[in-house]
Image (tube, rainbow, N blue to C red):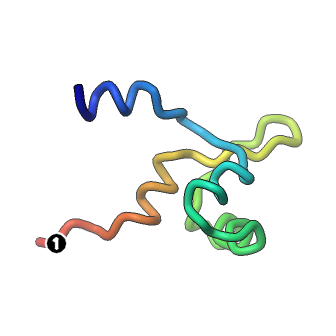
């Protein structure tokens, strides 16, 4: 078991509170990153969902050439 199984169980989006818990980034900073366009969100009614893809892309350094 490895990457494919882990990715299948990972949610596509999380709420802001969960994103903060997962990353250790504070709520105010998270909203600032969202406002600046560093973190991608999806709005469902009044609910703000953060894509795990954007969290991962923000936190992981780009690959070296």
Image quadrant in which you'd find residue 42: top right
The reply, left or right, for residue 60 in relation to residue 23 is left
Residue 40 versus residue 15 in the image, above or below: below
Q: Residue at x 56, y 61 (%)?
A: 23
Query: How many numbered dots are placed on residues in this image?
Result: 1
Image quadrant in which you'd find residue 2: top left
Indicate the quadrant containing the C terminus: top left, top right, bottom left or bottom right.
bottom left
The reply, left or right, for residue 53 in relation to residue 65 is right
Q: Residue at x 37, y 32 (%)?
A: 7
Among all residues in the image, which is located at the extreme right?
46
Indicate the quadrant containing the N terminus: top left, top right, bottom left or bottom right.
top left
The reply, left or right, for residue 51 in relation to residue 59 is right
Q: Secondary structure at mark 1?
A: loop
Residue 35, image x, y percentages: 71, 68
Residue denoted by label 1: 64
Residue 38, image x, y percentages: 56, 67
Image quadrant in which you'd find residue 40: bottom right
- Please state which of residues 52 and 2 is positioned toward the viewer in this rendering: 2
Q: Residue at x 45, y 27 (%)?
A: 9
Residue 43, image x, y percentages: 76, 42
């Amino acid at each position: 078991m490895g990457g494919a199984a882990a990715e299948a169980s990972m949610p596509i989006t999380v709420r802001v509170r969960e994103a903060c818990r997962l990353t250790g980034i504070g709520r105010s900073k998270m909203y600032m990153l969202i406002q600046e366009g560093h973190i991608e969100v999806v709005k469902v009614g009044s609910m703000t969902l953060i894509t795990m893809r954007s969290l991962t892309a923000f936190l992981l350094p780009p690959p070296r050439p």
